[in-house]
Structure formats: C-alpha cells, structure tokens
Image: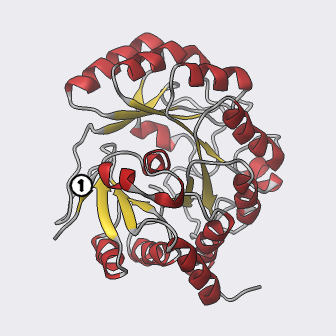
C-alpha cells in the first residue's frame, strides 16, 4: 500500500491540472461569517418533503437532520414556501426528506412543485436515495439541476447503519439510472459511516468513478446526540486523508468537494488542511485557517452561497475555466 505522503503528492499533481481556484461554499441553511465572507440566511435552503418522518432511522442520523429542514409535506405547501423564500432573496433549494422502507425519498408526488420552483428561477437540488427510473425521468423533465445521493460500498453498512436490505450494486444502479435519464449527479461518500470505521469507502469511490458524476462529495461521520452513533469517534485524520487522496486519483477529471458534514474543532481544522493538500476543488463552511492555507498554496479563493456540489455544473470538469470565477465572490484580502 503506498504511503500517505506519496498518495497526497500524486493527488496534488492531479490538482495542478485543474484551474488554480478553490470554491468555498457557505449556503444560507447555516450561518457563516468571518473576516473573509458572510452568507445570507435564506440564500440556499433545505426542504423536507416528509417533515420529520423517516422509515429508515439510520444509525448515524435517526431523523435528526430532518429537524433542521423546512417541512413541506405537500406539493401545495412546497409552492407556498418557495414563494416566501423568493421574497427573502432565496437563490436555491435542496429538496430532501426521510427515506421510505426501500431507501428512496418520495419525490415523485412533488415533481410539479419542484418544477414550480424551477420556473421561479431557483437552483433545485434533490436528495433522492435509491431512485427509480420513473422518478429520475420526471425530475429531468422539470429541470432539476442535480441529484445528490449517498453511495455505500459495504453491504453490512447498508444493513446495520441504513437498515436496508440492499447491496452496493444497487447504489451504482441508482447513479446510472440518473445519468441515463440525463440528470447531473453529485454522489456523496460518508467517511467512517460504519460506526467510525473505514469500511467500503474505497469500493464506493470505485463505483462512483464508473458513473460519470459531475462532482464527488466527501463528508465525514459527525456523531449526533440522540443517535446510535452519539459516542462514536470519527476516523483518524490520516485515514481520512487517504480517502481524500484516493478520491482524487480515482476521479482525476471530476470536481472533488469536502461537503458540510464533519466533526468540529481541531479535527475540522486538520482535516480541511489535508483536504486542500489532497487536491479538493471546493470546501463547505471552511475554517479561516483553511482559507489562508489555500491562498498560501497559490489557489485563488472564491466564495459562493450555493451548494458545493454545484461547482461541478458551473465550473465543469477539471474544476475550472472561466465559469468557476463567476459563481461567487473572489477574496482579495
């Protein structure tokens, strides 16, 4: 097995083939402010089509993430919420919700409401779970900008954490279903999902590399109160960095992002620095020290209030070109 420093060097060499920019994403679903940038509360908002309900009750979440979203349990309510958000200057929404017993978020009844949001000029992302072709085609027809879905590479994790009777190949099939329908995808890998252990992450990355994604999003297990994993320790930073570097090597042409979820404090600071060194193209809600580190690496720093996964659409593959500098505010200071 190659040493970590060697892997990171290879990853950084690949990063040099991308535009010398790094996108720092701060959607309005969470307050973010420092000396470099401040976001607006309603710039990009998360909606739940099931409210707080979820059939899976995954071991790492137990529905807690749904509590942070605006409930839109009917299409009519979604349209009303969209109207209110537009009045507050909203630019985009993530339509999510709890999964059913099959592992799919019930988006199909909301397709017309999603189309309504698109008609208002909003960017619309959806978190789909294990999507069916009928749903994928319908979402493409109303112009959904991107589909986000977790990809799991270990069957025991699917069973023990997600409480589903599926196999890793089902997640590959879901990605391919979206691509065949003409949808942009940004698959997510939760590092340490199996109770803090690395188990299946590399398999997940290998499957993702076969699905032609528009971005690859890496997040890290962040223990939450009220869940089975409340006391779980995240993977060591060195092991996590190995996943970062491998993701870069397996997807050399694809924008690679460090998403919203990761443990806070010193762990966050260390892991963000390593993510930059491993060649990520974007980081959500970065620490100030990470911003400074990226600039010291020679990267042009750009902020956006949109979801980090969208840089794969705006910036394109190889992470850049002229489009990347148009998605947000460049930091000059």
Work out whether residue 103 can be spotted.
no
Left or right, 177 with reference to 94: right
Rendered position, 273 above or below 99: below
* Structure colour scheme: secondary structure
What residue is rendered at 53% in x and 58% in y? 255
Q: Is label 1 in a helix, a strand or a loop?
A: strand
Q: Position of residue 248 (x, y in %)?
A: 60, 68
Among all residues in the image, which is located at the extreme top?
76
Name the residue located 47 percent from the left edge and 56 percent from the top edge: 259
Judge left or right: residue 141 versus residue 308: right
**Quarter of the rendering occupied by the C terminus:** bottom left
Residue 281 placement (x, y as % from top left): 46, 63
Residue topped by disc 1 = 329
Point 31% across, 49% down: residue: 326
Total marks drawn? 1
Quarter of the picture containing the N terminus is: bottom right
Residue 95, percent across and down? 48, 31
- Residue at the far front in the pictured view: 322
**Residue 264 placed where, x, y %?**
40, 67
Q: Is residue 273 above or below residue 107?
A: below
Quick check: can you spot residue 128? Answer: yes
Quick one: label 1, few (<14), some, or many (20+) residues within 10 Å? some
């Amino acid at each position: 097995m190659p040493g970590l420093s060697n892997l990171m060097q290879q990853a950084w060499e690949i990063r040099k083939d991308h535009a010398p920019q790094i996108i720092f994403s701060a959607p309005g679903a969470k307050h973010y402010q420092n000396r470099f940038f401040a976001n607006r509360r309603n710039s990009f908002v998360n909606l739940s089509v099931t409210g707080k309900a979820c059939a899976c009750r995954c071991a790492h979440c137990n529905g807690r993430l749904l509590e942070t979203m605006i409930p839109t349990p009917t299409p009519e309510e979604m349209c009303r919420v969209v109207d209110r958000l537009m009045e507050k200057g909203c630019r985009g929404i993530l339509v999510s919700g709890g999964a059913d017993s099959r592992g799919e978020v019930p988006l199909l009844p909301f397709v017309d409401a999603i189309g309504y949001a698109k008609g208002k000029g909003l960017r619309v992302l959806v978190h789909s779970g294990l999507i069916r072709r009928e749903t994928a085609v319908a979402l493409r027809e109303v112009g959904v900008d991107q589909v986000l879905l977790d990809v799991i590479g270990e069957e025991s994790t699917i069973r023990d954490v997600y409480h589903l009777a599926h196999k890793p190949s089902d997640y590959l099939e879901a990605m391919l279903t979206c691509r065949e329908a003409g949808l942009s995808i940004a698959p997510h890998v939760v590092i340490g999902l199996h109770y803090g252990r690395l188990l299946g992450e590399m398999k997940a990355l290998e499957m993702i590399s076969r699905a032609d994604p528009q971005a690859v999003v890496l997040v890290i297990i962040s223990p939450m109160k009220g869940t089975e994993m409340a006391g779980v320790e995240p993977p060591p930073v060195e092991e996590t960095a190995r996943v970062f570097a491998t993701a870069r090597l397996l997807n050399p042409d694809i924008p690679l992002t460090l998403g919203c979820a990761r443990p806070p404090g010193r762990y966050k600071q260390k892991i963000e620095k390593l993510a930059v060194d491993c060649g990520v193209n974007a980081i959500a809600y970065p620490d100030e020290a990470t911003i400074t580190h990226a600039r010291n690496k020679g990267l042009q720093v750009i902020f956006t209030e949109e979801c980090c996964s969208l840089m794969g659409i705006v910036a394109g593959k190889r992470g850049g070109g002229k489009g990347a500098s148009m998605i947000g505010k460049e930091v000059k200071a």
